[in-house]
Amino acid sequence: GLAGGNYVIANLGQFGTIQATSTTATSTISTGGLAVGTNQFIIQQNSGNIGIGSTTPSSRFAITGDGTGATRGFVFADSSNVERVSILNNGNVGIGTTSPMALLSVNSGQIVGAAGSASAPTFGFTTSSGLGVFRGAADELAFSTGSSERVRINSSGNVGIGTTSPSQLLA
């Protein structure tokens, strides 16, 4: 092998393997970007975009799945290679499950959000910003419509409709 110094390899045409073993060197490929295989790994020269599974990555880092429907397109795994987050080709995201059945499926865990308010509920709907569920106070659950609180359940289980201080169970 080659040791020490800077090396320039020019006008090679097609070649078999380049192997870099230095732990301090920086390699630069300045013409045409970098491609491994047809579309396994691409770095576009002009944009710097990186693509896996795509020859034309449309963002800084783009991963394109290899199928459609409920097959896994992207997976986050821990150091033991146990899948923790799965994104299917149909757009479903699973946390703690490898087969999410909805846009977001959470298995054996909680979804925790900020306290929210009647006008900006913690859990709401895209078409109605003031419609949803939020934390009314410590250990209290509140529901809003039209950006106003309509229902509250306190820590005693009392339900108030049109009041923020329920004093009775709802029968």
Image (cartoon, grey):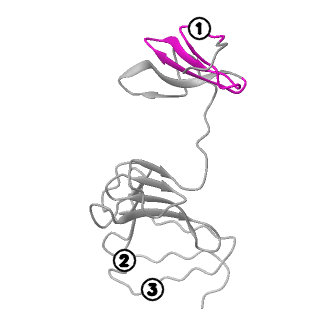
Q: Earlier in the sequence, mark 3 or mark 2?
A: 2
The outermost residue toward the bottom is 1
The outermost residue toward the front is 171
Q: Residue at x 35, y 55 (%)?
A: 57
The outermost residue toward the right is 138
Q: What amino acid is at disc 2? A: Asn
Q: Nearer the viewer, residue 94 or 77?
A: 94
Number of numbered discs visible in the structure rendering: 3
Q: Nearer the viewer, residue 57 or 11?
A: 57
Q: Residue at x 60, y 34 (%)?
A: 113
> Is 134 placed above or below 71 here?
above
CA gap, disc 1 and disc 3: 73 Å
Q: Nearer the viewer, mark 1 or mark 3?
A: 1
> Is 145 placed above or below 109 here?
above
Q: Residue at x 39, y 65 (%)?
A: 72
In contact (CB < 8 Å): disc 3 and disc 2:
no
Q: Is residue 146 within the magenta segment?
A: yes
Q: Nearer the viewer, mark 3 or mark 2?
A: 3
> Is 143 placed above or below 37 here?
above
Judge whether residue 30 can be spotted in this image: no
Q: What is the magenta range?
A: 138-165
Which residue lies under the disc numbered 1? 163
Which residue lies under the disc numbered 2? 11
**Residue 112 on image: x %, y %:** 62, 38
Q: Nearer the viewer, residue 146 or 74?
A: 146
Q: What amino acid is at disc 1? A: Thr
**Residue 81 on image: x %, y %:** 58, 73
Which residue lies under the disc numbered 3? 17
Q: Earlier in the sequence, mark 1 or mark 3?
A: 3
